[in-house]
Amino acid sequence: PSRAPSDADDMNCIENNNSKFFARTRGDEKKYKCKQLRKKNDKKKQKMCEMTEIASDGTKPAKDVCPVTCNLCNCGEIANAKFYFKTNPGGIQQKNKTCGWLEKYFERKPEKAQEICNMETPDFDIIKPLASEACRITCDTCLV
């Protein structure tokens, strides 16, 4: 399956932290990043996600740029989201990777990338989720 979001996906989406959207706040035209929107309280987030105006330079509103944060996706993933990758020898330091890294890894080594998606939960506490949870579109683990 294609990893790029499209209308055919029925709103399976990948969102980037640094993608910018347009919002008119108190009469001012402003641009924000998706990661800034995720930090807002639910009421402000909902208000920004309901805006439909496009900026004079063509910058789209939050609902078009940050569909995962605006809860418009059946299945979504944040490209910059980190997942547990491995633990260094000695078991002390956990290494994490991003969904964007995994998507590129699929292009180079699909079998190895699939092994990462199929990884089982280790016998110890991990700080970040597994790739199959954090990168549901890249790993094709959407239950839609």
Image (cartoon, rainbow, N blue to C red):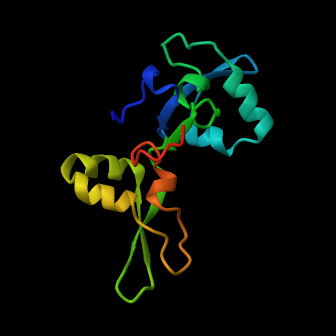
User: Can residue 78 be seen in this snapshot?
Assistant: yes
At x 53% / y 19%, what residue is drawn?
60
* Residue at the left extreme of this rendering: 108
- Residue drawn 34% across and 52% down? 102
Report the number of numbered marks.
Answer: 0
Residue 87 is situated, as x and y percent measured from the top left of the image, at 40, 77
The residue most toward the bottom is 90
**Residue 9 drawn at (x, y percent):** 45, 27
In terms of depth relative to the viewer, which is nearer, 82 or 34?
Answer: 82
Q: Is residue 112 above or below residue 31?
A: below
Q: Position of residue 11 (x, y in %)?
A: 52, 27
Q: Quadrant of the C terminus?
A: top right
Residue beneath the point at 44% across and 44% down: 79
The vertical placement of 16 against 21, above or below, is: below
State left or right for residue 98 relative to residue 106. Answer: right
- For image coordinates 70% across by 21% down, the residue present is 50
Name the outermost residue toward the top: 56
Is residue 19 visible to the viewer in this orientation of the structure?
A: no
Foreground pick, 37 / 30: 37
